[in-house]
Image (cartoon, rainbow, N blue to C red):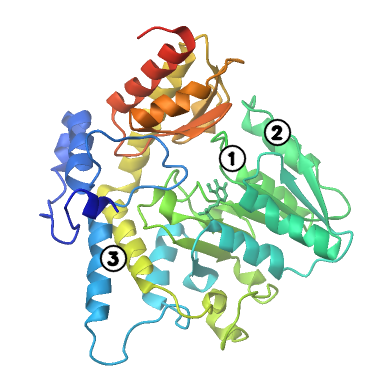
Amino acid sequence: MAASMFGMSAAKVERKPLPDPKLRETDPEKYWLRIRKEQFLLPDWRAFLNNGSLGVAPIPVLAAVEEFLEQAAALTSDEYPRWGYETLDPERTEMAEFLGCKKEELALTHCATEGISTVAMGLDLKAGDEVVMTDREHVSGQSPWRLREQRHGITVRVVKTPHPPKSSAELADLMIGAIGPKTRVLSFSGIISPTGTIMPVKEICAAARAKGVLTFIDGAHMNGQIPLKLSDLGCDFYAGSPHKWMFAPAGCGILYIREENLDRLWPSIVTGGWDDKTIGAARFMKLGTNNKATVVGMIAGLRFLKSLGPDNIYARIHDMAKRNYAMAAKRPHLQLLSSPDDRLYGALVTIGFKGANVDNLWKIARQRKIWVYGGAELRLSTHIHTRMSDLDAFYSLVDEVMLGKKS
Ligand SMILES: Cc1ncc(COP(=O)(O)O)c(C=O)c1O
């Protein structure tokens, strides 16, 4: 655990206020470096470029979790809050307001995987009904539908997508064009996990709706990475993972169920209250005893995000991604799977190595404490704690391994 590893407890380190926002305007590099240093437990030697897998919880979040657990352990009666039997109305209200949906449409889950599975298992689909997805879905986006394929004889059809795509319109045409007479659900990632490509969710959902087809958006990478208003997306279902881009501790998910679908979806894990339709999406949170400290941490993460300003965060992480893109683009030994049109990515940029064997790269990256995610394709994440020196260290390593020289 980071806190004990550095001999620090987040609840006990001195809590620093955020720097004066004027500094963000006058010297953004200094501002964001101070955020990293003062608001995270990240040591200087750690170059963390894999926020896309799991983000880093800042000090206020770690402190909220620790404090909650300590207070709960010191309770003298049985008032210990047991997420899993509660509807968590205040927390859902605050999260729903941020995500742009109604509290009644939002369930708090543990991760995107749980949300995707809940929807895939909970819809009445029969043999021959078709679900359409892209060829770049995360395993958690594919597996629940594959299970239903084997168990109930539904058909899963996969649409090949180009990376980099020429345009949003190209992606929209592909997905909309794939809708056939048996298609019941379009299920796809709003941001494609391996490449970071932003899908034209709104256009695809509107076209699907016009044809009576349900839409499920795997938003694991959307909330927190790009500006988002769920009610504007026009999808039927959405699952997200605030522990990637929203500073939440691991084990936090969200599931949005559009109001008109609340009664048609069956919950899969149930206890008392599962059939109480008056509580809206909260009946999908009736899972049995859970750890409320993670929910408390998730709300602390949301408040941290709001205190920095979602627009400021997006401006910074997208700017870092553009710099990252430029660093890759000027290296002829690399190829980019992200589009040159920066409207098609947020803070994830993916590169390939033009056929070179880079097995060594992972080993050396680990030795140098550079955290990256990938194999033949490599996805780099830039969040507010990312420094230019982290990107420099990564690209020097790539040059060294691929060209045998120090850059
Ligand atoms: C697009 C996508 N969907 C789903 C998941 C699964 O997320 P989680 O592990 O939070 O359930 C991921 C994780 O990386 C992802 O990238």
Q: Nearer the viewer, residue 112 or 188?
A: 112
* Residue 342 image point, x, y percent: 49, 27
Hey, what amino acid is under mark 1?
Answer: Ile
Hey, what amino acid is under mark 2?
Answer: Thr
Distance from Cα at disc 1 to Cα at disc 2? 10 Å
> Residue 381 occupies which quadrant of the picture?
top left
* Residue 130 image point, x, y percent: 83, 55
**Farthest residue toward the left?**
14
In the rendered image, the vertical position of residue 90 relative to residue 249, given as above or below = below
Give the labeled residue for mark 1: 192
Q: Is residue 188 left or right of residue 232?
A: right
Mark seen at residue 161: 2
> Residue 294 occupies which quadrant of the picture?
bottom left
The residue that appears at 75% across and 36% down in the rendered structure is 174
Indicate which disc, 2 or 3, sits on the residue closer to the N terminus: 3
Tell me if label 1 and label 2 are in contact, CB under 8 Å.
yes
Mark seen at residue 227: none
Answer yes or no: disc 1 within 8 Å of ligand 1.
yes
Tell me if label 3 and label 1 are in contact, CB under 8 Å.
no
